[in-house]
Image (tube, rainbow, N blue to C red):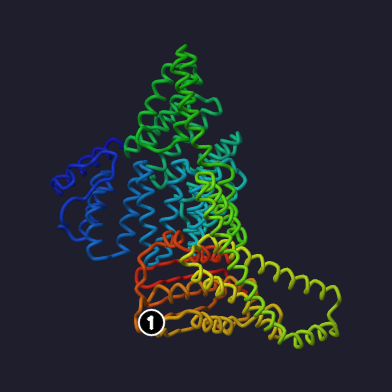
Amino acid sequence: MYYFLKLIKLIAIILCLSAYGQDSTEFVQNEEIKFVGTPHFSMEEYLERSSNFNDINVYDSAIYYLKGAEEVAKSIHDVRALGEINYKIGNIYYAQSNFDLAQSHFQSSVMYYQLIPDTLGLAGSYNRLGVSYKYSGNFSESLNALNIALKLYMTAEDSLGIANVKLNVGNVFKNIGKSDKAINAYHEALQIFKKYNRQRSVANCYNNLGNLYKNEDQYDSAFFYMYQTLQIREQTNDEQGLSFIHHNLANLHLKSGELDSALFYISRSYIYKTGVNDKMGQATDMEVYGEIYMKKNEWRKAVLHLETALKLLEEIDNLEFKHGILVNLAICYKNLGDFKSSTNAFYEAKIIKDSLDKRNSHTLFEGELVEYELLSDSIQKAHLLLEQDLQNAKNENDELANKVLKRNIFLLIITILFVLIFFSFMIIRYQRNLYRTTERHKKLARSSVPKEEKVILLKEVHHRVKNNFQIINSLIRIQSGYMDENNFREKLKALETRIRSMSLIHEKLYKNDSISKLNVKEYLSELKAYILESYETDTEIEFDLDVEEQMYDIDSLIPLGLIMNETISNSIKHAFNGNRSGKISVKMYSDDKFTYLFIDDNGKGSGKSMDQLKHESLGMELITDLTEQLDGKLTFSSQNGFSYHFIFPRLK
């Protein structure tokens, strides 16, 4: 029956090739396929033809027609279609185990979906990007992409999307030896898939649980989950899934010492993999063949299969898998007395191991597992990098270092003078409110609040003031790195507005009955007015402020104020380019789970990406760091004006 189906598939391939003529006959093997010529089909026709070839596993032709669809989409500026097409191309390269090209197209898909923006499209692209990174052995990047996908699916409240990501995260945890985390992720995904009766996905969870228990030498549990998987995949006629479970059962029987059963299952797996032209799968089967023959002490047969596996992997980027094969080959050569080949294989394996260790260090893993929340951490890192760059420059050229030192001393003196003047001004203003503050303190002392609570309250106030002075100090030190003799006045003006956005909060707190919360609408209104007064411009700027009436505490208001300062200042300085008029709109509201902040202008934009703008000034770096401090997500565009869309967990 199986070979009859393969014959039908072959006939279908021939018919498709005859129907579509010579459009798909010339392709570049193992390289990015290029579409040449003027599009002569509609986008729908290109997509339909691609789908037909993809269904019968003629991947080169499928990609060719997708490239044609991409040209049409570009010509009509259909961004959504470009995202979908790159996603499909990435999936085809992924199916061919060409993970480098798969990652490239998933990254393009992410870029296009960010421009729309399309939350579910972005989530799907990040999910596939994460899986692709996993198969190429880059577990740190994989976890990063999957974490982003999980947040997006949670935002969209897509339960099945969440389950798919958790399944993939479990696979990464399994690969890096975090078994407990992997089991938790699998069972969380399993509950969702069972709820929605997604049998193939349930089978995937069982399969991965079986593999994990096999790695832990818990064979009874491993056999239980794998036979559950086999049963479901036979019921659903999942051909690709059947190839995977036969491979896993072969591995399990091999590890438990049942070599004849292992040979039976791996032979079935190889038949399935050949049928779908899965080179990566064929290579993994050849490796299992080699390990079986190693157990049997049939070293020449083992070498034959392991070398075949290496040959299949020549065009596939999977260093971890190649490392395991090379180690086994070295052992086989040694037992055959071929010590030269054994040494060469061990040497190649060591090179790969060093590369993998560098790519997937423990520090990188922990960096992706833990989200950094404090702005001071990011500022400290930037400061350390700046000091390192200055030290390198000093080592390379003493004369240049002396010039830098003199310039920095000059700028530091100017900055210190500026700060002294600014704080002198603030002290004078605070003295005006001294009497009111004293009366409030006396009232607090006479109140029925216990002494212990007053002490805690005062300590909290001092702590917050101390933190804000540390932030100011860090801002001054980092800003100095962007100063030179030509722009220091401009940079000092930017620094002044940042400090002013923070001091305005404390000034309003002194005047307010509450010492911990402020009305966000009133605060942002005053801050907007100050920013507009701070910059000289010939443009008449209309300001549309639509902000909810909510009381926010200082921990939310300070980052919000700094974000508002950076975005509005950027629009005033760069968006309107001498136009007579311009408009900046700020909209902010909350629902039960999230707080949304949208800041847009109708200027000309810059056409630059977020990363490009980070390299040019401190402002964009601050915006992204402050967004992370509030556990938020930023979508940015500068194509048609500057547009910042923030989503935060509901601010308090």
Front-most of residues 365 and 439 = 439
Which residue is rendered at x = 40% and y = 77% of the image?
601
As drawn, is 129 to the left or to the right of 178? left
| Residue 87 location, quadrant | bottom left
The quadrant where residue 584 appears: bottom left
Mark 1, residues whose alpha carbon is within 10 Å: few (<14), some, or many (≥20)? some
**Residue 30 picture location, percent across and down:** 29, 39
Residue 270 x, y percent position in the rendering:
38, 32
Above/below status of 480 relative to 506: above
Q: Is residue 33 left or right of residue 438?
A: left
Q: Amino acid at mark 1?
A: Gly
Residue 186: in sight, yes or no?
A: no
Helix, strand or loop at label 1? It is: strand
Residue displayed at 38% across by 43% down: 99
> Which residue in the rendered view is the most extreme toward the top?
337
Q: Which residue is mark 1?
A: 582
Residue 212 place in picture, x, y as percent: 56, 40
